[in-house]
Image (cartoon, rainbow, N blue to C red):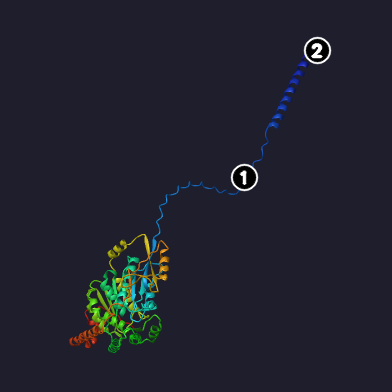
């Protein structure tokens, strides 16, 4: 029994120990689990995904390295070329002209008589210029320098042509003159053909109607030593030149139109016009267009036709207008038919491309020319007999203002001659010989049948006439 009891105690003690060990192990395990739970980080809830579409930006392209810039071309230098005589200009705006035209007015008028023609020409792409002839226009403002002077006038026209060629080296340059201006243009073309690409001469003949009375008046002045006393010749010229009262009134009321000339000037004028026949024979290469109004009551149309036949060049054309009076281009008298015919003639008589290219090649490519005109006569470079010159304050200021800019330049005539001009010093004896020579020529023409009845011959039958324009 004791042995049994002892065994049971032993067994009970063993179970108790086992239970205590298991209890300790479970307590240690629970304590370890709680420690691990406290030490572990608390995870936050995941954010809700957005339903909006995202814009995905494309990756930026790498910037290209800057290209090497070519050196900028320098702007052309503007060279101002001044026409040093009273001159008006009508130039196309915003574009280069196709042609260049220089106009010379008739007796008693001034450069403003081409206002209408110049505006119309500029609209068709033709740069048009018109100069005042010595003794007319603003030249009358200069005391002692207002006398008619053909030699100086021709020099003025030549210098103007040189300026225009320099300003427009690749453009054709034509010259147009009417009546006395037509004779001046004829002379310039004969003496300087290299400056004229084409001549348009309107009624340049000096063969006028009713000249006997004028000759007697001049002869009387000469005999009474009144060579420098002015006499009214303009009123008679106006009445014979046109029947249009509006044109007559405008002609008489323009203060720059000169109606009175001295006997000395009239003798110089007639001598200059008488030389037209010989002048025409010297034109042997320049294209020529003659224009005549068959209703002209001042200058005989037959005289223009006869002068046309003396022109030596083969490239010539005579345009007759049946209803036209003396003025065809001046004082707004140019009809659309005549205007279009003249423009077309210029287009068909421009120099060949090789000639124009050669001119352009001789010009400075780094400069651009700009023609500057003046409406007042020059006060400087007045040449005396010894060739010296004097300058006034007005011209000096003009020169200084022009030369103040590095891009300006002036082209002016080498000299101005204010002399009496050719034929101004004709003596009584020489005047008588001129009258005798003219009378002999007139008688010879009558005997040969070249006057009178020839006026009734249809002009279209003449071999030298290639075109006829009828204005209505």
Q: Which residue is mark 2?
A: 5
Across and down, in percent, residue 226 comes to: 32, 86
Instruction: Tell me if residue 250 can be seen.
Output: yes
Q: Quadrant of the C terminus?
A: bottom left
Q: Residue at x 66, y 37 (%)?
A: 43
Q: Which mark is residue 386?
A: none
Image quadrant where residue 417 sits: bottom left
Across and down, in percent, residue 171 comes to: 32, 67
Image quadrant where residue 193 sits: bottom left
Q: Residues within 10 Å of mark 1 (few under 14, many from 20)?
A: few
Q: Nearer the viewer, residue 206 or 290?
A: 206
Determine the CA span between mark 1 and mark 2: 75 Å
Q: Nearer the viewer, residue 55 or 140?
A: 140
Across and down, in percent, residue 331 comes to: 37, 81
Q: Indicate which disc, 1 or 2, sits on the residue closer to the N terminus.
A: 2
Q: Which mark is residue 49?
A: 1
Secondary element at tag 1: loop
Q: Nearer the viewer, residue 73 or 298?
A: 298
Q: Are marks 1 and 2 in contact (CB under 8 Å)?
A: no
| Side of 277 where 141 appears, left or right | right
Secondary element at tag 2: helix
Image quadrant where residue 90 sits: bottom left
| Side of 122 where 39 appears, left or right | right
Q: Nearer the viewer, residue 174 or 165?
A: 165
């Amino acid at each position: 029994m004791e042995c049994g009891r002892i065994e049971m105690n032993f067994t009970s003690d063993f179970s108790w120990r086992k239970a205590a060990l298991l209890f300790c192990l479970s307590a240690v395990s629970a304590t370890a689990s709680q420690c691990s739970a406290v030490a572990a980080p608390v995870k936050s809830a995941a954010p809700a995904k957005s339903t909006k579409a995202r814009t995905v930006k494309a990756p930026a392209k790498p910037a290209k390295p800057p290209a090497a810039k070519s050196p900028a071309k320098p702007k052309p230098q503007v060279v101002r070329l001044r026409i040093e005589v009273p001159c008006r200009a009508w130039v196309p705006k915003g574009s280069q002209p196709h042609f260049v035209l220089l106009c010379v007015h008739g007796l008693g008028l001034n450069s403003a008589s081409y206002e209408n023609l110049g505006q119309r020409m500029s609209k068709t792409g033709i740069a048009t210029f018109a100069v005042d002839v010595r003794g007319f226009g603003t030249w009358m403002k200069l005391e002692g320098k207002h006398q008619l002077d053909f030699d100086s006038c021709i020099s003025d026209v030549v210098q103007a042509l040189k300026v225009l060629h320099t300003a427009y080296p690749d453009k054709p340059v034509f010259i147009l003159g009417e009546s006395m201006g037509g004779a001046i243009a004829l002379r310039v073309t004969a003496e300087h053909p290299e400056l004229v690409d084409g001549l348009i001469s309107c009624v340049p003949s000096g063969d006028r109607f009713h000249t006997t009375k004028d000759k007697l008046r001049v002869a009387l002045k000469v005999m009474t030593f009144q060579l420098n006393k002015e006499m009214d010749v303009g009123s008679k010229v106006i009445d014979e030149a046109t029947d249009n009262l509006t044109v007559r009134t405008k002609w008489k009321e323009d203060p720059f139109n000169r109606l009175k000339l001295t006997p000395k000037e009239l003798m110089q004028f007639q001598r200059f016009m008488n030389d037209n026949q010989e002048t025409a024979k010297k034109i042997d290469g320049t294209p020529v267009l003659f224009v005549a109004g068959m209703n002209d009551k001042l200058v005989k149309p037959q005289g223009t036709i006869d002068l046309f036949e003396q022109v030596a060049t083969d490239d010539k054309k005579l345009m007759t207008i049946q209803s036209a009076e003396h003025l065809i281009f001046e004082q707004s008298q140019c009809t659309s038919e005549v205007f279009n015919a003249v423009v077309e003639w210029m287009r068909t008589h421009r120099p060949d491309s090789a000639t124009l290219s050669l001119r352009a090649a001789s010009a400075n490519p780094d400069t651009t020319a700009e023609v500057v005109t003046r409406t007042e006569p020059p006060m400087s470079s007045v040449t005396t007999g010894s060739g010296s010159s004097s300058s006034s304050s007005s011209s000096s200021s003009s020169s200084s203002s022009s030369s103040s800019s590095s891009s300006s330049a002036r082209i002016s005539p080498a000299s101005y001659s204010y002399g009496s001009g050719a034929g101004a010093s004709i003596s009584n004896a020489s005047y008588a010989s001129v009258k005798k020579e003219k009378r002999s020529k007139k008688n010879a023409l009558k005997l040969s049948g070249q006057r009178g009845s020839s006026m009734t011959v249809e002009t279209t039958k003449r071999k030298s006439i290639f075109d006829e324009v009828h204005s209505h």
